[in-house]
Image: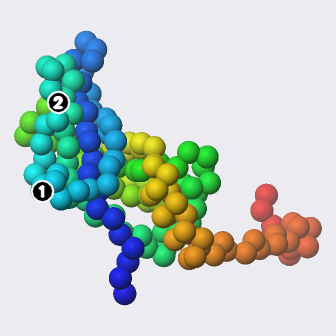
């Protein structure tokens, strides 16, 4: 079965000596839809000595039915975003690279629980509409279960 997917590229920004405690500060600047003109290798877009922007192409984002709740939560947050996991290079602390991209709020939460660096950047209207159409078609909220009042449970099943 083919999964809906798009190719994207991540633009990372590096700031040199943002304060006296850090040599480098990294952040995801934007996520853009991928184009063949980007090539396959990372490339520096701008470097003025203080700020550096690097384009990292070649990410494929696929949608999965079991992540629909996370897509729904992202879309209904009021400001849908891309979630990007990135890591610093072990050998060179002046380099950070994006690892993966997602649109699922739940997946981003799992990454944060694993103590990964996760940044989010605004999601464009075209991709938000694409995600909304997929979520509308496949997301089925779980029905809410009625919770019995404690007084109707046997004493051994009551919570204190």
Q: In this view, does 117 lie above or below 106?
A: above
Q: Give left or right: position of 141 versus 15.
A: right
Residue bearing mark 1: 40
Horizontal and vertical percent for residue 84? 34, 49
Residue shown at the point (14%, 31%) measured from the top left: 94
114 or 135: nearer the viewer: 135
* Residue depicted at x 57% and y 55%: 75
Residue at image x 49%, y 63%?
Answer: 131
Disc 1 is placed on an element classified as loop
Query: Badge 2 is on which residue?
Result: 46
Alpha-carbon span between mark 1 and mark 2? 18 Å
Looking at the image, do the residues carrying marks 1 and 2 touch, with CB atoms under 8 Å apart?
no
Is residue 114 visible in the rendered image? The answer is: no
For the point 14% across and 19% down, the residue is 49
Q: Quadrant of the C terminus?
A: bottom right
Q: Earlier in the sequence, mark 1 or mark 2?
A: 1
Image quarter for residue 156? bottom right
Label 2 crowd (10 A; few <14 / some 14-19 / many >=20) = few
**Residue 32 in the image: above or below residue 133:** above
């Amino acid at each position: 079965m083919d999964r809906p997917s798009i190719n994207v590229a991540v633009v990372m920004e590096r700031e040199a000596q943002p304060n006296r405690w850090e040599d480098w500060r990294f952040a995801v600047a934007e996520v853009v839809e991928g184009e063949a003109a980007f090539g396959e290798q990372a490339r520096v877009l701008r470097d003025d000595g203080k700020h550096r922007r690097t384009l990292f192409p070649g990410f494929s984002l696929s949608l999965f039915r079991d992540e629909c709740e996370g897509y729904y939560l992202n879309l209904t947050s009021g400001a849908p975003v891309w979630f990007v996991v990135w890591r610093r290079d072990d050998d060179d602390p002046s380099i950070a690279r994006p690892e993966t991209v997602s649109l699922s709020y739940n997946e981003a939460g799992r990454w944060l629980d694993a103590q990964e660096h996760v940044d989010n950047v605004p999601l464009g209207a075209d991709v938000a509409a694409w995600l909304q159409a997929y979520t509308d078609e496949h997301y089925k909220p779980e029905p809410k279960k009625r919770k019995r009042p404690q007084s109707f449970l046997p004493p051994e099943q009551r919570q204190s």
